[in-house]
Structures are given as structure tokens and as C-alpha cells.
Amino acid sequence: MKDILVRIGGEGGEGVISCGEMLTTALARSSYDVYTFRTYPAEIKGGPAMFQVRTSDEPVLSQGKLADILVTFNEEAYKLHGHTIHPEGLLVYDPAHYQANGNFECYAVPLEQITLDVVKSKLGKNVVSLGVISRLLGLSLELLEKMVTDRFRKKGDLVVGKNIEALKAGYSYVDQHPFKKPVPKFEAVESPIKKVVMSGNEALSIGAIAAGCRYFGGYPITPASDILEFMDRELPKFGGSVVQTEDEISAIASVVGASYAGKKAMTATSGPGLSLMVEILGLATMSEIPVVVIDAQRGGPSTGLPTKMEQGDLNLAVFGSHGDAPRVVLAPGDVEECVPYIVHAFNIAEKYQTPVVFLTDQSLAHRTQTFVMQDFSKIPVINRLQPTAEELKDYMRFKAMPNGVSPMAIPGTEGGCYAATGLEHSEKGSPNFTPQIHTQMSKKRFKKIEEISKEKGFTTRFGPKKAKIGIIGWGSTQGALREGMELANKSGESVALLQCKMVYPLPEAEILEFIASVEKVVVAELNFGGQFNQILRAKFLIPTLSLTKCEGLPFYAEEILAKIKSVSAGEKADAGAVLARS
Amino acid sequence: MAHQTTDYKSDVKITWCPGCGDFAVLNALYQALASLDLDPKNVVVVSGIGCSGRLPIFVNSYGFHGVHGRVLPTAMGIKIGNPKMTVIAVGGDGDGLAIGGGHFPHAARRNIDITYIMLDNNIYGLTKGQASPTTLQTFQGKSSPYGVSEENLNPIALALAYDVSFVARGYSGQLKHLSDLIVEGVNHKGFSFIHTLSPCVVFNDTYKYYGKKVIPIAPYENTSNKMRALEMWQDKQHIFLGKFYKDETRQTFNERLRDIISQFPRDDAKYFKELVGRYS
């Protein structure tokens, strides 16, 4: 099995990210699986940037930890990432920047001099580096040349030519200067399975269009802005419209308005924006209007860590509203799952006339993965229930129905006139504040959530059918948790994993079945307080153990393994949880 | 058969206080809709929160009674979502100039093809009498026992400065005139703003004050002359009623969005294929 992690570090603006992206595309086109991860500064120019790609001839589950190959664009990158080189790894550095020594192999490449010699400017170091890395990995030069040509074609022949020269210069330098580390060769393989490589933001945007989204209102915010840009560019091709609104409140208000008017509509934001949107999410719950809200979570409260990841918005997504305002919260497990689960988000929103919050995070938003794209014509799309001619004779927008879902008239429908309102209302939709109506309508809104909790396909179980330790995770940690579980099982532990893709309402049957099949439950998530753990404890009254991490970074498989070892050695749940059990 | 005003009356009991200016605005709206002969199923009346926020519930058409201050973005979403609808946004002075004040310039920039009737009662009525952004400084009330510390905003001045493409003022004391303005506002291609003086007889009865001050804008005034419009709002002796400004040369937001979409002949399968191809 080939499995290698390449990490590239440098200064923001030096081309670290573009070098990594081109490398990723080259690997994907050579039919290898990739899993990328990037960190970037909150500033536009300057500050440390890092891009890494883990690649394999088998599916890649997580971003990986130690670098097999580290490429530094400057000394600071070495200071930041030097300690992450595998003991048997390889460091590529420019001797003009610093002198390197370590147990790993230090491979000097005069990156800047080569660039100056070939391109006659400092710009192009990233493409020289791409040539160096590609040769180290044994990638096909022909394939790379074609890719570089495609990428720079718009800038003209001169630019294409310079970049090809830079690429070849890096590539041939390695030819002339042998290295010792045995690196598996990633030669191009012909594969009948055509895979795409894209980020979570791109995958969910395409999925949303496939699900029928035809209005998008959004306000720029890291790390969700590229969804707005994607929609700006692509949605008009499908007959849809996009508005960059004056703030997040306007974004969600326009989305609710467009959906009321009959269009499937979505917005995308991050935590600070979701904070602003919760009042109108309550309105959507109250007036039973389908909307989808993406929250690409970043780190910390307030402005926090705008370019880092965290799973800290769960409580806001689930409970953020005044009054009892139940809504649905989904969280895909990886980039590939962004496609089917955003379709689920629209389908649930439409079927149950409810807001759906779709939780991703900075890592999932911007990392790229390889996967097979579904056939769009086969994606099942559900549309909202509309009143029949018979029902329109005496139309009741909020008519009592067994599953809580009443037919929703679209403006323009004869006989369907009603006023959607955030006030408590009768079946007809008129304001009504009687005790009976408020109880009846609250039951209706919660009935829908109860029905949604019975929907299938919102958990994924990995590992043995029975196990000593069961990990429950949610959202984008799936790959790392799974890899941690597999490491543990190989080392003699007995571990299973249940990844929840619907975090509210809880897929009760699946979770109960999982709990019954394990002896101890560990809830793993990337926030400080253990938000999902609290929700699970409150629901199931079980003494779970909590694994949290609050560093602005994803889990590493090794951290999962360490926790399993600790639990296996007798680590107990905290006193509060044990009390709850007794 | 042409529609009658009664066709637009819903069967929900009206909850405004007796004598409220909003009754006249509602009746002017019924008359305007009848005069425009619009099918109720093709009209959406949208509102925020406040006394005037209840208005859509009293109209037999589609309606949307949303949250406080967000009537304009909600109405925009509705107009984009269903361009065939005639969208009429209503809201108060607090709704539109305090909590929702940030949306007004952007609705103007977009020239979204809706009509916005601001029912200005110079007070927060539904919360029982606090000063609003248009309350005069001399007003002494529960939240301003020593008078209002801030100067009052002038909605017409704001609309002119924001370059709203149709700016007019009506008065609940002149129902027929108001109704005619609404008709013209709805017919206007683009964003139309009708500032409507609608006194609150309970907390800030300005009928007497307005009665002495309102005068019609002379019929000879040129409504494409913005300097003249600005002069009129600065006249402290009078409150002008009528059309201040009108510009129908600008594209509406829906037209621009439609222009973008029409660059791409409908072929979803082709665009999906191209999209996926870009990531292969």
C-alpha cells in the first residue's frame, strides 16, 4: 500500500496553496485518492500558510499527522513544521534560507536560485517546488505539463511557457541530485472509475443545485464565502438567482421570503452569521417554511479563530432561538457526503416544511478529497406538499395532519391565500393566542421533528457488531475517528464507531441499538465543553466518557487511539454522569 | 368582472385602536388594489412588527407577517422567488428606520420592484408610547420624559439621498390621495417608497399638527428634479404631500437578475456535466 503525506509550508502569498492544489490535482488525475488540509492566516498577505496532501492507492480517511515529505519555502516554515517530519522523512529546503540538520533526510534544493535562473523573477518558486515534489513522487511529467498548461492558459502563452520551464527545472534538479529516502512511485494509473477532487464547500454547492436550490442569499464570511462565490457563478446557469445581501439577517430573511414564494432557497455562513440568523430561523419554524442554512463552523466564540476549525456551534444550531423552536441539524462526515446530505437537507426541509441547519467546519469546507460523483439524474428530489383542489375550497394552511405536515400553497395559487406569520396562529393561519391553539400548534411543530427522527440513513456504523468501547462522533471527524478505531482494533482493542449525520433530532433507534452493543460509550468532538456529549447524556441518561479537543485543528487518529487505550485501562466517566445513571 | 374593495378584506377582526390612522391606510390599500384590479392571489403584502405589521392579516391576498425590521429583505426574497407577484411591503417608522434602517439603502440600490408603504405614526405604538426615530424632540412620553434627546429623521430626505426611484408622501387624513399614490407606486417600475403620515391617536396624536402643515405638491412640479424635491423637504413651514421624485429609466433588480440568467440557455444536464468535469 502506498500512503504518503506531503506538507508544504511558507508565507501567505508565496503560492503554497496553489502549489499544493496543483499537486493534488496531479495525484487525483493519476488515479490516487487524496485528502488535503490547509491552514492559512487571517490576513491577506503574509503570515504562515500550510498545505498538505495525503495520498494513497487506497481510500484516505484522515489528513494524517507526520509528514513523509516537508517542503519549506522559508525558515519560519521549518520552525513551525520541522517537528512534524517523520523520523524517516525527507525535508526539502533552500540552503539560502537556513541550514538544516535532523535525523530525517535533509535534501537541499536552491529553490529561489533555480526560479531566478529560469523565470527571471522570484515568482514561480511554487511551480519549481511542484516540479521537485512531483519528481520525488514519480509523477508523470507529461501529465503535469498538461495540467500547468490548463491552469495558466487564460494568462497567455508567455506565462504558460515560463511555468512549464519552472516545472521542468524543479523536476530535472531532482533527476540530477539523487535522494536516499525510499518514496513509493505515484505513476499515472488508468482507472475506469472517474473520480472528482473537490472541497466540502464545492461539493455541497453542487449538491444544493442538484437538490433544486434556485435562490441563494449570502453575506461574505470565512470559511463560507466561497459558497457565495460558487453560487454567484453557477446558479444563474440553472435559472437561479443569487444576492449578496447587506448582512446575514437580510440573507436569511430573503431566503425565507424566496422559499415562501415557492423557490428552494439556501444561505451559507459561519458562527457569527448564524448568531444573527437565529431570530428568523425561529420565524421559519413558526411559519413552517423550508430553508437550508449552511454553517461552516470556525473556532471560538465572537470573532474567535476565523480560519480554524471547531465543532462549537452545535448548541447554537440546535437550540439557538427564543421559545420552543425545533429545527433539524445535519452534519456530513466528509467531502463526499456533502453531496447526498445537502440533498437530504433540502428534502427534509421540503417534506417537513422546516428549517435545516447544515453543519460543516473550516476543515471540511476547504479540504479536498477524491470521490465518485453521483449521477445527477438519479438524485431523489422531494418537493413540498401542496394543497389539492378539494383542500383549496376551504384552505387551511396549518391544518391538523397526522404527521404534522400541512399542505403549503404557493403564492399565485387560486384559493390558497393566507398570511404566513410569526404570531401563534390557528389552522387557518390567523393570529390566535388561546391556550388550546398554542398547545396544539406546538405539538404540531414537534410532531414533525419526531417524524424526522425516524428517518433512516443518518448514522453510519463502523467496526465490529459488538465491542467493548463504542465511539459516537458527529460531522467531519468521521475519517479520523474511523482511522483511530482501526488502529485500536489492530492493536488488540475492541472498538466500534457510530457517526451521526443528523445531530438533531437524534436518530434514536440507531443510537440506542449502538449503545446496547457496546460496554462503554466515548463521545468524541472538536469543542471544549462536549456539546454533543451533553445532548446525548440528556437524551439517553448514560454515563458517557467525553473526548474533546479545542485547538482549532482536526483530530489525529493517534489521539483517538490514546483515548481508547485510556478508557480500556479503566478511565471512568466524570462523577456527574455516574450520578445521573444511578 | 372588475374587483371591488370588499374582495380584499379578510375576515380577521381588525385590532387597531379606534381612530388609528392605519385604518385609512388599509382602506386606501383596498381601494388601490381594486382600482388596479389585481387578483388577490397575485398580491403579497409583507410586513414587519408593530401596529402596522398586522396589516397583511387584514388583507385577503397572500401575506407575510415577518420579524421586526426585516420587511424589505423578506419582500425582496418574495419578489425574486415569484416575480409575477405584486409585492407590497408595509411597516412602521421604528421598523423601517430604527431596527431595520440598514436595509432601506440596499433596497434602493437594487431598485427592487416592490412598493414600500411606511406607516409613520411618530411613535412606538404597540409597545405603548416610546419615542421613535421620527418623533419630534419636543415630545414628552414614557421613554422621553424630558423630551427626545435625538433629532428626528426625515424619511423623505433619506429616500432621496438613497436614490429611491419613486418617492412620495401620503396622509391618512387624505384617503383618496393616498390611494392614488399607492396605485402609482405599484405601477412604478422599480422601488417605490410612499411615506405615509398615519397618526397614533392614543400615544402621539399628530392629526392637528399635520392638519395645519400639510399642503399638496403643486401639479406643475417636475418630479425628475431632485434638487427641487430636496428643497421641499427642507421647508420647515410645510409638510408636502404627493410625488417628490420619480425615475423610471433605471433597471429593476429582477430585470438585472433575469439578464444574467438569460445569458445561459436552459440545459441543466450540460451545466452539471461541465461543473463536474472541472473537478475531474
Image (cartoon, rainbow, N blue to C red):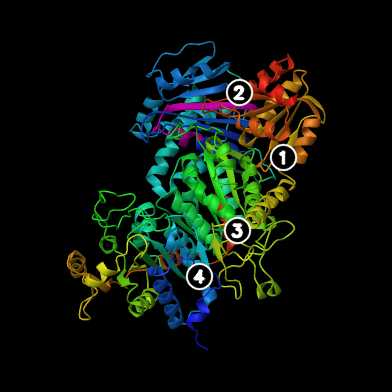
Which residue is labeled 2 in the image?
Answer: A183
Label 3 sits on a secondary structure element that is loop
- Can you see residue A171? no
The residue stretch that appears in magenta: A3-20
Which image quadrant is residue B69 in?
Answer: bottom left
Dot 4 and dot 2 residues touching (CB under 8 Å): no
Residue A530 horizontal side relative to residue B249, left or right: right
Q: Mark 2 — on which chain does it sit?
A: A
Q: Mark 4 — on which chain does it sit?
A: B
Which label sits on residue B58?
4
C-alpha gap between disc 1 and disc 2: 38 Å
Dot 3 and dot 4 residues touching (CB under 8 Å): no
Label 3 crowd bin: few (<14), some (14–19), many (20+), radius 10 Å: some
Q: Nearer the viewer, mark 4 or mark 2?
A: 4
Q: Are marks 4 and 2 on the same chain?
A: no
C-alpha gap between disc 3 and disc 2: 46 Å
Q: Nearer the viewer, residue A443 or A11?
A: A443
